[in-house]
Image (cartoon, coloured by chain):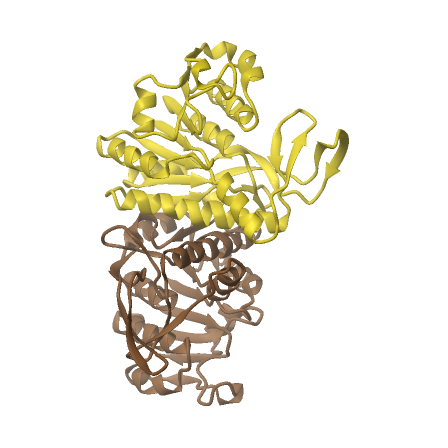
Chain colours: A brown, B yellow
Amino acid sequence: MLVVKIGGGESINLEACCADAAELVKARQRLVLVHGGSHQTNVLSQALGHPARFATSVSGYQSRYTDRRTLEIFCMAYAGQVNKRVVELLQARGVNALGLSGADGRLWEGERKAAIRIIEDGKKKILRDDYTGRVERVNSALLELLLGAGYLPVLCPPAISYQGELINVDGDRAAAATAAALKAEALILLTGAPGLLREFPDESTLIPHIPARQVEEFMPFAQGRMKKKVMGASEALAGGVRQVIFADGRIERPISRALEGAGTIIS
Amino acid sequence: MLVVKIGGGESINLEACCADAAELVKARQRLVLVHGGSHQTNVLSQALGHPARFATSVSGYQSRYTDRRTLEIFCMAYAGQVNKRVVELLQARGVNALGLSGADGRLWEGERKAAIRIIEDGKKKILRDDYTGRVERVNSALLELLLGAGYLPVLCPPAISYQGELINVDGDRAAAATAAALKAEALILLTGAPGLLREFPDESTLIPHIPARQVEEFMPFAQGRMKKKVMGASEALAGGVRQVIFADGRIERPISRALEGAGTIIS
C-alpha cells in the first residue's frame, strides 16, 4: 500500500501526477491519493473578495484562518474544483477514481479547535470562530471497502469534528494519519521542490536521506509549509510507516521517480 | 428504498430537508439523497465574472450552457459548497452521510453532447464545447455497497462521460435514473413550490394527483425547470418506480409531509 499526497502549490503538475498514478494502479499497485488545494483556495478567496488570512501559531506553524466563509470557499476549491479535476484526470485514463472529503463517511475525524493562539505583528492574540482541527481517527474500514471493490480513493480536506462540523485540517498530516492507519509501506509527499533542501530555495542542496529517528533534527531546514510536511513525516513514521519520501511534484512521472530514489527519503 | 431529490432553488430549506432525512434514516428508512445547486452556481458564476448562460433547446427545454470554466464553477458549487454542507447537516444529526458526485466511481455515466442545438433570439444556433450529457447508466452496485455498510449516499452532478470527462447533467433526471436503478418505491422531488400547479404561480391550483400513464399530458402545466422534473417523473415511472411526488422543499418536515400525502402524487 502506497499513500501519495499531491501538494496544493501552484507549480504542481496535476496531469503528470495523475498520469503516473494511473500507470501504477494499472500495474496493480495498491494506492490511495490525497491532494491539496491551497493555491486554488487562495485564488478563489481573492476573486470572491474574502482574501486568505494566514496565522502563525505560538509554536511557529503557519495555518489558514478558517472562518465560516473561508470554510465554504475551502470546500469549493478542495472538494469541488481540485477533487473533481483529479477524478476526471484519472477516469480519462481508465482508473475508477472516487473522490471523498474527510467529512464523507467520517473518513477523517478530529477535534475542532475553535480558538487558536497566534502571533500577529509580534503580539500574541487569540483567533476565535476558527473551523480547524487535526485528524485523530481515520475510517480505514471505508477505504478498505472501496479499495476492495476496485475504486481508487482520492481524498482531500475538510475533515469532520466529533460534533459533525466541517473542519479544515492539514492535508499532509491527514495523509500521514491515513498512511499509518492503512499500514502503508510508504508515504510520498509531492511538493513544489525536489525534496527537503539544506538551504532553501537552492535545489542543489537537496538532502537525499534522513534516518527515521533523526527526522525531528531536520526541522530547522523546513521553511513555511514544509514544516508541516516534516511533522507529517514524523507522525507517519511513528505510526509504523516504514518510509516517507519528499519528492518533486512538478515533473513527469513524479511518483515513479520518487520510488526509484529521487527526493528526500526518510527511512 | 426512497430517493429524495432536494432542489437547487434559492427558496429550498436545506436545514429542514436534512433534519427530516436524518429522522427517516434513524427510523430505518432506506434512503438515497440527491441535491441540486443551481442557485449557488448562478451566484458563484456571477461573483467570478462568468455569469450563467442558459440555452433553450429546439425541443423547448432550458439548460445551462457549460463551457469548461462553467463546468469548474459548477463543480465548486455542487460538489464543494452544497454537497459538503448537506453532509455536514446530516453528520451533525448523527447520520453517517457520504457525498459523491456522479463522476466518482462512475456513479452516473452518460454520453457527452458537445454540441447542442438551441434557439437564441428566435434563431436556431449550435453551441459547441458544451460539457453536458444525460445519465444513461447508474452504478447501483456502488450505492448498494455504501448503503450496506451503513452510509447515507448524498449525490449530485456532475456525471462522467464514457470517455471520462466531467459532464453537467440534470439532477432531477439523474435522481429518476437512480430511483429506477435502485428499484425505489418512490422518488420525491422537493422544489420551491407545493407541487405541480395548474396555473403557475398560483399555489391554490395545486394538482394533487396524476395517474402515472397520463403524466405526459400534464407537461403543458410545467413551467421552466419544472419541465425536466415532469420528464424525470415520466422516466422514473417507466423505469419501474411506483410513485413520484413533487413536494414543497421550503417547509419543515418536507419529506415526511410528502409521504403523508402533500404535493402532487403521480402513481
Q: What residue is rendered at 45% in x and 66% in y? A: A52
Q: What residue is rendered at 54% in x and 29% in y? A: B225
Relative vertical location of residue A168 with respect to residue B251 in this rendering, above or below: below
What quarter of the picture does the N terminus of chain A occupy?
bottom left
Q: x and y percent of residue B54 in the render?
A: 63, 37
Q: Which of B137 and B262 is in front in this view?
A: B262
Left or right: A105, with B171 as reference point: left
Relative vertical location of residue B117 with respect to residue A13 in this rendering, above or below: above
Relative vertical location of residue A132 with respect to residue A243 in this rendering, above or below: above
Q: x and y percent of residue A264 in the render?
A: 43, 80
Left or right: B22, with A149 as reference point: left
Q: What residue is rendered at 38% in x and 22% in y? A: B186
Residue A5, quarter of picture: bottom left
Q: Nearer the viewer, residue A198 or A70?
A: A70
The tally of labels here is: 0
Relative vertical location of residue B267 with respect to residue B134 in this rendering, above or below: above
Tell me, yes or no, if residue B105 can be seen here.
yes
Left or right: B237, with B46 as reference point: left
Q: Nearer the viewer, residue B181 or A1?
A: B181
Residue B121, quarter of picture: top right
Q: x and y percent of residue B94 in the render?
A: 23, 43
Q: What residue is rendered at 71% in x and 42% in y? A: B128
Q: x and y percent of residue B258 in the render?
A: 34, 22
Tell me, yes or no, if residue A154 can be seen here.
no
What quarter of the picture does the C terminus of chain A occupy?
bottom left
